[in-house]
Amino acid sequence: MPKTFNELMREARATVREVWPDEAARLLAEGATLVDVREQDEWEQGHIPGAIHLARSYIEQEIEAAVPDRNARLLLYCAGGVRSLLAARELHEMGYASPASIAGGFQLWKSQGRPWTQPTVLTLEQKRRYSRHLLIPEVGAEGQAKLLGSRVLFIGAGGLGSSAMLYLAAAGVGTIGIVDFDVVDLSNLQRQVVHTTDRVGQKKTASAAESIRALNPGVEVITYDEMLAEDNVARIIEGYDVILDGTDTFETRYTLNDAAVRAGIPVVHASVFRFEGQLTVFRPFAGPCYRCLYPAAPPPELAPGCSVAGVLGVVPGTLGMLQATEALKLLLGVGDPLVGRLLIYDALDMSFQELKLRRDPHCPACGDGAGTAADVQGAETTAQPLTLQAPAARPLTAQPLTAQPPSTRPLGETR
Amino acid sequence: MSKVRIPPVLRAQAEGNKQVEIDGSTVGDVVHGLVQRFPGLGDQLLGTDGSLNRFVNVYLNDQDIRYLQELGTPVAAADTVVILPAMAGGA
């Protein structure tokens, strides 16, 4: 028997509870799952924070994947309360226990001065470029927007940095900083794939920037054609969300570590030797720092760099890509970052081994006596998302860091 | 006999061995046994007072012995001792 629109609405109201925005806000605070059933263009103009977007036209197809639990407390809204009421009735028929609809919808919610947010809207070009990211629930448009707004600093445009910066540029990390004072040498090209033969003799920073722009012109590249040292490190690292350490000397690694701890910026650390590599994430105060792991540097003759000992070209590439992976996880706030764990890679065995690392309470950089930042930071958690603004430099109340390791090679060399 | 994993940077002093088996009831026994077998490793692993150098980490299985009982940490036959000096290579 044909029904009028008013009859349909009446039937829907008989099975679906309508709630006013004030009650909706209370239900949200109690953990209800909020679903925005409007069309894409309406969603892009603004939505209630925390809502998932399942347009009315697809909701029956998509709800089971988005909300598998039939007993979940669902709260639906549209612009004025009609579409969400009808959608809620459909979900009720699908067996969802108690879908409710916000009366008055987003318009009333907004007019009452309740919080709403406008999602970062990707351009058509960005939607195509990053389409494989957008398909992953853990990234999606929101995660991609985070990457586009994030800033990653590379210490060294060498073997580790090459693969990592290409992949992070491809992934759409919005700003990439590169610190390197060296020039491209023919002997670099066996592994430093960000550089090219016709750029031998050019500055590594300029060469890397050219490759990144060719791959993804949407990335802003900032180059620092200088050695990382005590007197410039704080200025250079300020404002970055994550740092990838790919330097070749202990001195630079300690300099970077101490400054990154003070600034509260996580460092994704890797080093390589012939067929092997080490990888870990130093997240200040959530795990150990470089000084906790290695309180002192070995004398130079016991720790030859790649220019002396050699390295299989692909090994820094592998480790660089693992660094890039950890950086993306930190930026997106997904997964379990390699904090407090040291990964050892052996290419000849093709084996990965994991060792447990601990924060040293007596560490001169991040130990309990080193400053107040531990109290501020305070986190033992592993998967919290990063704030995309780096925290302001923290006061350092302890004595200046001493015991600089000996080094016979220039700072920041990445050859 | 515990397995001892020798890192690449130290293999030249250990006749190219990647892993060796050394007797001992503590990590200290094993490290000293290793140095006895490959005297060239002595300078790299141990200070003049016989303690571990600060740029070398030793793990019993996956745990840093600094947070166990250091060189006094007991070892069993099935254990693996991993020696890991700092490396800086950025390639």
Image (cartoon, coloured by chain):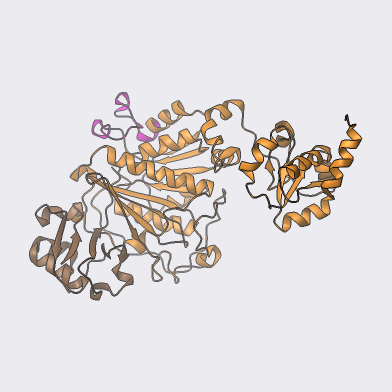
Q: Is residue A373 above or below residue A116?
A: below
The quadrant holding residue B72 is bottom left
Q: Is residue A124 above or below residue A297?
A: above
User: Does any portion of residue A410 appear in the rendered image?
Assistant: no
**Chain A drawing hue:** orange
The x, y position of residue A398, in whole percent, is 45, 69
Name the residue at 42% across, 36% down: A167
User: Does any portion of residue A251 appear in the rendered image?
Assistant: yes
Name the residue at 79% across, 49% down: A114
Q: Nearer the viewer, residue A234 or B9?
A: B9
Q: Residue furthest front?
A: A1
Q: Nearer the viewer, residue A195 or A14?
A: A14
The quadrant holding residue A48 is top right
The x, y position of residue A346, in whole percent, is 25, 48
**Chain B drawing hue:** brown
The x, y position of residue A36, in whole percent, is 73, 41
Q: What segment carries the magenta color?
A: A184-206
Name the residue at 43% across, 65% down: A366
